[in-house]
Each structure stands twice: as C-alpha cells, then as structure tokens.
Amino acid sequence: MRYLILSDLHANWEALDAVARESTGTYDKAICCGDLIGYAADPNLVVQWVHDHCAIVVRGNHDRACTGLDDLEWFNPVARAAALWTQKALTPELTDYALSLVKGPVLLDGFEIAHGSPFDEDEYLLAASEAGHAFEYLECRLAFFGHTHVQGGFIWNRGRVETIGRVPPQSTSETLEIDHECAYMINPGSVGQPRDGDPRAAWVLYDSDAHAVAYHRTPYDIEAAQRKIRDAGLPPILADRLAVGR
C-alpha cells in the first residue's frame, strides 16, 4: 500500500494543488497530520480537498483555533488575526467538518499519525532529546507527525536517537529505507508554510510493501499565494515568509 502523507497545509491552495498534481497516481490512500487551515487565504478550497481525498485526518492546533474550539490567548498576534479571519471565511459546512477531526494519535495499518507528539498533540518535536522521550509513547515502530513545519524526523537506532534531515535544496526527493529493528518518527514537513529554509511544499510517500519513505519537495506559485494573502488583508508577514521558508 502506498500512502501520501501531508501536514500543515495552512490554507495554501497553490501549494496543495501543486503537491496534488505531482503526486497523482503515486498513492493508494492520502492521510493528513493536521493544520488544514490558518495563515493563508484559501481555507475553503483546502478543507474541501482534504474532505474529498484524505482517508484519515487528525486535527491540528490551528484547526481547533480557526473553528472556535480553542481560546486564542496562546496564539501570537499574527496567528490570532489569521484565525479570526478564517473563522469568518470558512463555510458552515466545512467548519463542521474541521470540528469533526479527531485528536491524534490514530493507529492505521501498522503505523500511527499525530499532529504534535504521541503524548501531546500540541508538543513540538524539534530536537533528538525531545524525540527520545516521545518514542516511549509509540504503540508501533513507525509514526508520522507534523506541527513543526520542519521536514525530516527522528530514528531510534537501537538505543540512540538520530535526526533525519530534509531534502537538500538541489534535490526534489530523498528515500529512507525502513529498518524493522529501528523505530521512526517521520515529519513530512509543511505543505503550506515550510519553516526549514526551503520554500518548496514538503510531503512524503510511504510504501508499506517496499518498507520505504520518500521525502519530496515541490515548487509552487508562491507569488499567487502571497497575492491572495495580501488581498485578503491578512498580516503581510504571512505572505513574506512563504518566499524564504521561515
């Protein structure tokens, strides 16, 4: 079985559409690790695509905030402004769908998916030391997570935790072979707002038969996404950061 794993779409239709087009025909089932909305200007198009194409979706913190499920006091001013805008822009039907998203982690076909860590959906896993603690909570040896917007993840290699790097700027994909003696926490990176220094949309394909994860980066029309953000009156930094992947 081949799985398309996405995370942190953040209402960026241009990025999601580019990934959808590039991945067409390469997967059997699509899965999303949350944060469909927030930040960019196309929440309805993005949520509708996820509704129509993704078999399993776990909620992210922005999905909760942008539907009124969470208080916005912990959000910075930029994220708060985007959440309030999204609450008004998202249709009632798609708001209901976003509200129905389940809390991770969710077990599926021998692996699990979460938004943050397996013990806290809002926990950021950025360092190997943090991941070492998280591995203790896994119910299987392979998990996919998002939230950090940083492609890569971590390997538990017989007692040592190692960091997996993102696809190099000069490449479009890198493949990681899965060793069943190890455990893995794989971050596909962010489709809609990468923060690892590479502005290209990030995603992965997992082939359970070949025991391999392929990391991908896809260029998209960043200027179009930026223009929509500015035209919507959203904070300008949300447009500016797309060009630098930060």
Image: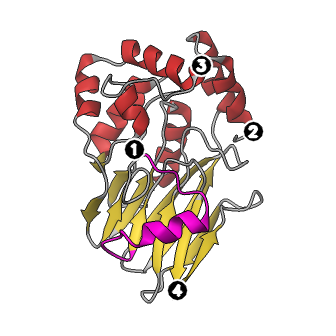
Between 130 and 142, the one nearer to me in the picture: 130
For disc 4, the marked residue is 159
Indicate the quadrant where residue 164 lies: bottom right
For disc 3, the marked residue is 229
As helix, strand or loop, the secondary structure at mark 1 comes to loop
Q: Earlier in the sequence, mark 3 or mark 2?
A: 3
As helix, strand or loop, the secondary structure at mark 2 comes to loop
| Kind of residue at disc 4 | Gly
| Kind of residue at disc 3 | Ile
As helix, strand or loop, the secondary structure at mark 3 comes to helix
The spot of residue 62 in percent (x, y) is 43, 33
Residue stretch rendered in magenta on the structure: 122-141
Left or right: 65 with respect to 231? left
Q: Earlier in the sequence, mark 1 or mark 4?
A: 1
Discs 1/4, front: 4
Magenta segment: does it hold 124?
yes
Q: Earlier in the sequence, mark 3 or mark 1?
A: 1
Indicate the quadrant where residue 194 lies: top right
| Kind of residue at disc 1 | Gly
The spot of residue 7 in percent (x, y) is 46, 48
Q: Earlier in the sequence, mark 4 or mark 2?
A: 4
Residue at 53% over, 57% down: 125
Q: Earlier in the sequence, mark 2 or mark 1?
A: 1
Whole-Å distance between the Cαs marked 1 and 4? 30 Å
Whole-Å distance between the Cαs marked 2 and 1? 22 Å
* Pointers 2 and 1 in contact (C-beta within 8 Å): no
| Kind of residue at disc 2 | Val
- Residue 34: numbered disc: 1
